[in-house]
Image (cartoon, grey):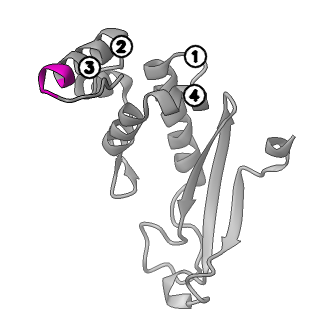
Amino acid sequence: MLYDSVEPVMEVPDIGNDGDDANGGGTIYLFSILRDGLSYLAACPPCIGNQNNPSGGLGISPLLITEFLHKIADTFVIYFGDPADESAVKDNFSTAYQLLEEMVDYGWPLTTEPNALTDLIRPPTVMAKVRLSIIVLVGGAQMILL
């Protein structure tokens, strides 16, 4: 299987950076996890959070990034049910986008507590989708959005 051969942390040359040592030596670190058949990926430049690091290594703990990817996957399970697979994310793309907007601020983890997220963003329900379609119909739109 393809996912069995993917390493959780990979070092990839940045072809758009042209090897500029001032911007991290032309390397990007990719962190990945696999949950319910869905691959979660984070791309991080070297020296993130520490621009004065002359060694060019990753200035942030890889465990922080990996734990954050697991928090995203756990949040998707809370919001979309188990398993939170590709079809669940496609069906609730707007909610997934809103969750990522609240969970990440300028590339840094911000709100990852599920109770705080459910206060900010209501989990999707069938009744909310029906209410949205009724609002669209009353507003004069010609199509039903479900």
Q: What amino acid does circle 2 point to? A: Thr
Which quadrant of the figure contains the N terminus?
Answer: top right
- Which of the marked residues, 3 or 4, is nearer the chain's N terminus? 4
Helix, strand or loop at mark 3: helix
Report the residue that reaches farthest toward the left: 139
| Numbered tag placed on residue 82 in the rendering | 1
List x then y, in percent, for residue 63: 58, 47
Distance of label 2 from label 1 (alpha carbons)? 15 Å
Residue 100 seen anywhere in this rendered image of the structure: yes
User: 124 or 146: which is nearer to us?
Assistant: 146
Q: Which mark is residue 125?
A: 2
**Looking at the image, is mark 3 or mark 1 nearer the viewer?**
3
Q: Residues within 10 Å of mark 2 (few under 14, many from 20)?
A: few
Q: Label 3: which residue?
A: 133
Separation of marks 2 and 3 at Cα, in angstroms: 13 Å
Check residue 87 in the rendering and tell me which mark sits there, or answer none.
Answer: 4
Range covered by the magenta-colored residues: 136-140
Disc 2 or 3, which lies upstream in sequence?
Answer: 2
- Expressed as whole percent of the image width and height from the top left, the position of residue 20 reads 55, 90
Q: Amino acid at mark 3?
A: Ser
- Whether the magenta-drawn stretch holds residue 138 is answered as yes
